Amino acid sequence: MSNLPTELKYARSHEWVRAEGGDLVSVGISDHAQELLGDLVFVELPEVGAGVDAGSECAVVESVKAASDVYSPVTGEVVEVNEALADAPETINDSPYEDGWMFKVRLSDPAELEGLLDAAAYSEVIESE
Amino acid sequence: MEKKTVLFAAHQAMGARIVPFGGWLMPLHYGSQIEEHHAVRRAAGMFDVSHMQVLDLLGEQARGFLRRLLANDVARLTEPGKALYSCMLNERGGVIDDLIVYFIGEGRYRMVVNAATAEKDLAWILAQAAGFEVVIEPRDELAMIAVQGPAARERVLPLLPGALRAGVAALAPFHAATDGEWFVARTGYTGEDGFEVLLPGVDATAFWEALAAAGVAPCGLGARDTLRLEAGMNLYGSDMDEQTLPLEAGLGWTIAWEPVERDFIGRPVLDARRGADGNRRFVGLVLRDRGILRDHQRLFSGDREIGGITSGGFSPTLERSIALARVDSGCPESCEVEIRGRRLEVQVVRPPFARNGRAVVKID
């Protein structure tokens, strides 16, 4: 059973969002997603300053076997990316919700978070797969 | 409905992630594909390869039949137990499958072919066998376990039936020893020393568990793929197929041109294309930058598209991405790969990339 912190919000496409105070959030991929992908060996992050739309492709994670798009769960501007992942993409496998965060977004509309799934709802998404 | 090997329950008990592959449900990995890869390069790992198809060819004309069927020449097999890697070609010179054939004794050969192609291979072989005194016998009751890595030898030998131990210990590479239904070959698909063990299905789980207890790491198809890629070994269906001549898949060395009168299937096409200027080259690639090379990515020299990647991935030994690729005959020493709309420089090298535990390509 994969680990699902209850303080986070989730997207159906397996990203998580953490409220970092104000209109700032951090984004990563869920424990379930990293487990499905297997050992990660490459991460391509968005550029700082780039605008992202909810549901749009904005990063790529590649495991030993396959490449997967990461979709931004929110709309806004990328203000920081986790540079440490370039040298250590496996951090996402080891710590998907903490050290394996991918990028931070300044939200255009903080109310957008309410449209995301809570842990219980995301858990149902996983089980229905 | 996918088939299961006799080891399926053992894989589940060891926490395997199971995936469909070539009509079978097989382990992809047991936790970490990269750790499994390193286990094979550094110590010993084992793979359930029971999904591969074993065929025995029996009869007075088995040898003559195989000399017609295969691009390599079984006449090279004079000692019992000796193995030969070969392509099986269609009339157009395309590769129906690649396989290993063992000479067991007069009128007795054993072939091991790929799982995903087993059905079409068998149909092709039976069709070609018309007119030859040969019986083709699928050996579906046998399991097959590959044990690979520098420590494979010391961990396998004590677990073999007593009558086989001395014979297996004395095996040269690409030779096999047999006793009863057990058949042990010093072959593999990883670039490491080791054995491929054919054994009765009823003995397979106990042997697998004994290997695990002896410290041999269970490894899935994921590690099998990265190991063979590093070893520069072709994957059927990716690096070559029925539309590809062996000459353009780095497999020219497996064609036995002599004697010239041996009329193997596909020979007229290969004779015409042998040494031709226009033949594409099969090369290795190393990505200098971060990123992952994947099959079907396109390769460029300046504005000119010069070929494409046939199989690629991450090399745990080199800690960067590598690939096999088919390129125009005039390919330079470096070129560019297009990944998600961006061009990145790749170095062209001669495979293998890694063997016997270490990198063997020089990276600029």
Image (spheres, coloured by chain):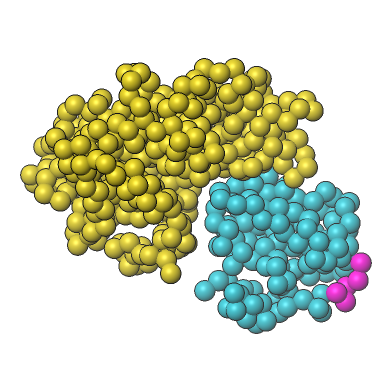
Chain colours: A cyan, B yellow
Residue situated in front as seen by the camera: B176 or B170: B176
Q: Which residues are magenta?
A: A108-112
Q: Is residue B129 left or right of residue A78?
A: left
Q: Quadrant of residue A101?
A: bottom right
Residue under the point 61% across and 64% down: A33
Q: Give the image location of residue A120, x and y in percent.
A: 65, 82
In the depicted structure, whether residue B339 falls above or below residue A93? above
Q: Is B260 a magenta residue?
A: no
**How many numbered tags mark residues here?**
0
Residue under the point 51% across and 32% down: B245
Q: Is residue B226 left or right of residue A31?
A: left
Q: Is residue B95 left or right of residue B6?
A: right
Q: Give the image location of residue B246, x and y in percent.
A: 48, 31
Q: Give the image location of residue A83, x and y in percent.
A: 73, 47
Q: Is A109 a magenta residue?
A: yes
Residue under the point 51% across and 41% down: B241
| Location of the C terminus of chain B (image quadrant) | top right
| Location of the N terminus of chain B (image quadrant) | bottom left
Q: Residue furthest left?
A: B163
Q: Is residue B124 visible?
A: yes
Residue situated in front as seen by the camera: B114 or A65: B114
Q: Give the image location of residue B34, x and y in percent.
A: 48, 48
Q: Is residue B57 left or right of residue A21?
A: left
Residue situated in front as seen by the camera: A19 or B331: B331
In the depicted structure, whether residue B98 falls above or below residue B217? above
Chief SS of the magenta region: helix
Residue under the point 83% across and 66% down: A54
Q: Is residue B234 visible?
A: no
Q: Residue furthest right?
A: A108
